[in-house]
Image (tube, helix red, strand yellow):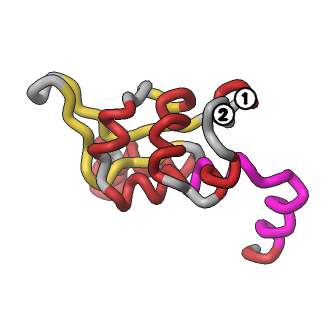
């Protein structure tokens, strides 16, 4: 194997490549640790919520990325499944990144397409 190929085949690079391929996945800056280190969560993938998964939460709070609203919705749409306790203990930078992914789900396709054309 060439040296350049070896450098690209590290687990960290594989994680970054996977995250680049899936815009709904975030690699955590600070991994979550559960159960005295028995489970470490280093990446989270979100899926677009269905309307029922937004129950009990104000849409305006979600648009504003309110922490309390996110702590209720993120466990419903995350893989691995987060708990409200996990969300309360997540690094703020990671919460903002997950909130950004979530905010993308709330945008109509036309708005996303316009934004993509401006950034291209």
Q: Above or below — where is 5 with respect to 55?
A: below
Range shown magenta: 100-117
In the orientation shown, which residue stands out farthest toward the left?
36
Q: Nearer the viewer, mark 1 or mark 2?
A: 2
Using the rendered view, name the quadrant where residue 87 is placed. top left
Q: Which mark is residue 36?
A: none
Task: Name the residue at 44% across, 38% down.
Answer: 44
Task: Name the residue at 65% across, 45% down.
Answer: 58
Q: Above or below — where is 37 with respect to 106?
A: above
Element type where label 1 sits in the image: loop
Kindly tell me whether residue 74 is visible in this rendering.
Answer: yes
Count of marks overlaid on the render:
2
Residue that mark 1 sits on: 50
Q: Position of residue 34 (x, y in %)?
A: 20, 28
Using the rendered view, name the quadrant where residue 38 is placed. top left
Foreground pick, 104 / 13? 104
- Marks 1,2: beta carbons within 8 A: yes
Q: Which mark is residue 54?
A: 2
Looking at the rendering, in which quadrant would you find the C terminus? Answer: bottom right
């Amino acid at each position: 194997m060439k040296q350049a190929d070896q450098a690209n085949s590290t687990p960290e690079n594989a994680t970054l490549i996977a995250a680049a391929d899936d815009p709904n996945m975030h690699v955590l800056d600070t991994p979550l640790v559960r159960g005295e280190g028995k489970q470490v969560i280093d990446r989270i993938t979100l899926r677009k919520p269905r309307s029922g998964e937004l129950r009990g939460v104000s849409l305006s709070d979600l648009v504003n990325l309110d922490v309390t609203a996110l702590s209720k919705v993120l466990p419903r749409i995350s893989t691995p499944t987060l708990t409200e306790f996990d969300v309360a203990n997540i690094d703020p930078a990671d919460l903002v990144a997950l909130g950004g992914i979530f905010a993308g789900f709330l945008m109509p396709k036309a708005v996303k397409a316009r934004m993509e054309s401006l950034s291209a």
